[in-house]
């Protein structure tokens, strides 16, 4: 059996890319031949190092459905038993025996229920979304009933280590469609230090700098001078595991100041790093936007916040109430199992078998 996977954002090396490559790993385990459609095969080692996945047997082919004409695409794609494409906001024509289109982003302001899109959809067997938040937008725009397959989290790789007084945030520094708003987190931490007298705690911001991070990263470094804030650029998987294991609290601010009804693309569509942190026993204090609300159950395994003041006050409460922190940490670890890599592979395999 032969499968082809196309992710137009592969070089961003983010959550969507982990999704695509974990699917590749799952297919390889079932004996499939897996081809990744990408112009530069040298990215393979970088992806393996970043995600710690067993994808050595994946082939990288310099094919793109974006640039080939319709006849050449049909002639090439008809040889595949399965195609799994990530949408870039458009609906591609797909020509394999089974065609699955994945939406990682809720493209509210792009997708339309046009006659040409309806025609393309007839060639697609299943539409998959990464969260119910994304599904709600996609289904509304296209008049479809998509399937939610939550992203795969390698839960077993993340374990609590000897905990330290660390607040951690993990997310790329690049300013693409969706900003992770590390600037808001630094500002909140400075307030904790200056106005509440917080001592002996450190804020660590870890993330990739692959695309468009330069000026923003410089501004972040300048804003945290004189404070116990550490910026970790391009950590590999081993570094991340250690950071998660040591941290007590996990922060996110992606989507801060954004109206998720008007601009759903600009908030967290799921929140893979939140689940990774929870698996390592961090207490999540995450912004109440997008897919984060499907991960964190307020007061049970973490906290959701909307205003910066809430982020500050909730964090202080967790720090001061050790019993609460331990209970939230325990519950967070339990909830993380719901998003395991094994569960993802089981779901995706059954989806491929479905007629």
Image (cartoon, rainbow, N blue to C red):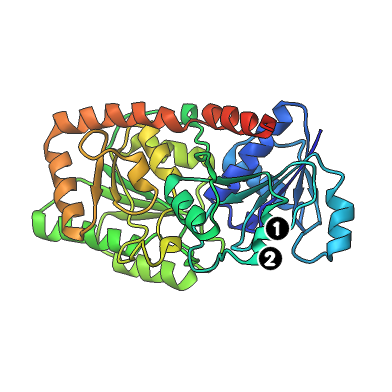
Q: Is residue 211 above or below residue 332?
A: below
In the image, 273 versus 204, the foreground residue is: 273
Q: Is residue 92 above or below residue 318?
A: below
Residue 38 rendering spot, x and y as whole percentages: 75, 55
Q: Quadrant of the image for the C terminus? A: top right
Judged left or right of residue 104, residue 117 is: right
Residue 292 rendering spot, x and y as whole percentages: 36, 47
Would you identify the image quadrant in which residue 116 lies?
bottom right
Judged left or right of residue 131, residue 258 is: left
Task: Tell me what residue is drawn at x 51 percent, y 60 percent.
Answer: 141
Looking at the image, do the residues carrying marks 2 and 1 touch, with CB atoms under 8 Å apart? yes
Q: Which mark is residue 116?
A: 2
Would you identify the image quadrant in which residue 335 lies?
top left
Disc 1 secondary structure class: helix
- Give the residue furthest to the front: 115
Residue 311 rendering spot, x and y as whole percentages: 21, 53
Residue 1 rendering spot, x and y as whole percentages: 81, 33
* Residue underneath mark 1: 120
């Amino acid at each position: 059996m032969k499968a082809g996977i196309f992710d137009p954002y592969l070089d961003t090396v983010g959550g969507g890319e982990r999704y695509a490559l974990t699917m590749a790993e799952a297919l390889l385990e079932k004996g499939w031949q897996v081809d990744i459609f990408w112009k530069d095969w040298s990215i393979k080692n970088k992806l393996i190092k970043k995600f710690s996945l067993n994808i050595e047997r994946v082939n990288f082919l310099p094919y793109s459905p974006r640039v080939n004409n319709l006849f050449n695409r049909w002639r090439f794609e008809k040889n595949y038993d399965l195609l799994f494409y990530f949408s870039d906001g458009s609906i591609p024509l797909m020509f394999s025996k089974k065609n699955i289109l994945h939406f990682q982003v809720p493209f509210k302001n792009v997708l339309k229920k046009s006659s040409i899109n309806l025609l393309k959809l007839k060639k697609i067997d299943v539409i998959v979304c990464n969260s119910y938040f994304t599904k709600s937008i996609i289904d509304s725009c296209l008049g479809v009933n998509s399937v939610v397959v939550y992203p795969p989290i390698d839960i077993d790789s993340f374990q609590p280590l000897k905990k330290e007084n660390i607040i951690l945030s993990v997310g790329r520094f690049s300013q693409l469609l969706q900003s992770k708003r590390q600037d808001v987190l630094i500002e909140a931490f400075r307030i904790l230090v200056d106005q509440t007298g917080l001592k002996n705690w450190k804020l660590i911001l870890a993330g990739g700098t692959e695309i468009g991070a330069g000026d923003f990263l410089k501004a972040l470094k300048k804003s945290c001078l004189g404070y116990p804030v550490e910026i970790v650029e391009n950590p590999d998987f081993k570094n991340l595991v250690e950071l998660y294991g040591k941290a007590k609290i996990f922060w996110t601010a992606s989507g801060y100041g954004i109206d998720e009804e008007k601009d759903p693309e600009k908030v967290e569509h799921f929140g893979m790093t939140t689940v990774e942190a929870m698996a390592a026993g961090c207490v999540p204090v995450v912004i109440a936007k997008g897919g984060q609300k499907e991960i964190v159950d307020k007061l049970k395994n973490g906290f959701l916040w909307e205003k910066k003041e809430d982020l500050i006050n909730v964090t202080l409460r967790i720090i001061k109430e050790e019993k609460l922190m331990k209970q939230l940490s325990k519950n967070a670890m339990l909830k993380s199992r719901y998003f395991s890599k094994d569960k993802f592979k089981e779901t995706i395999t059954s989806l491929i078998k479905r007629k």
